Amino acid sequence: MAKSYLSEAGELTTREIAARIIADKGMDTSGAVLRKTVAYRVVQALRLQWKRGTIDSPGKRENVRVWRIPHTKSCEHTVNIGNR
């Protein structure tokens, strides 16, 4: 779901993605606990994709991570996985 939102909007924060997921599923968007829970799950999933290079993050906006689909196949973010 998050990738489709990013494809449509370009750049979104974790909170914005979580709000869209909650609204699309027809849940109550006013619940703070639900918003935090969904945002936590979103950030965990997107961080794994960020490490794989399928999602890019240009940084943070108002202390919230911003996500986007990379323009090229490889992201600028690299992960050091150690010597193998």
Image (cartoon, grey):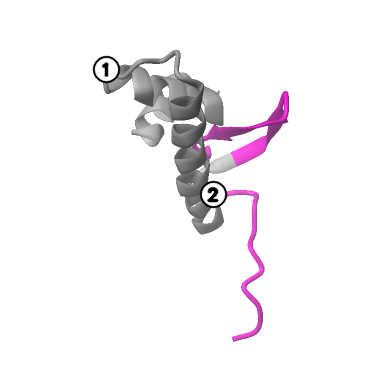
Residue at figure coordinates x 61%, y 39% from the top left: 57
Quadrant of the snapshot with the C terminus: bottom right
Q: Is residue 17 visible?
A: no
**Magenta residues, start to end:** 57-84
Residue at figure coordinates x 54%, y 49% from the top left: 47
From the image, give the main secondary structure of the stretch colored magenta.
Answer: loop
As displayed, is residue 73 above or below residue 36?
A: below
Residue placed under numbered mark 1 in the picture: 26
Image coords of residue 26 (percent x, y): 27, 17
- Packing grade of label 2 (10 A; few <14, some 14-19, many >=20) is some
Q: Report helix, strand or loop for mark 2.
A: helix
Residue placed under numbered mark 2 in the picture: 47
Indicate left or right for 11 with 30 as reference.
right
For marks 1 and 2, give the one nearer the viewer: 1
Mark 1 residue type: Gly
The span from disc 1 to disc 2 (Cα, nearest Å) is 25 Å
As displayed, is residue 81 above or below residue 78?
A: below
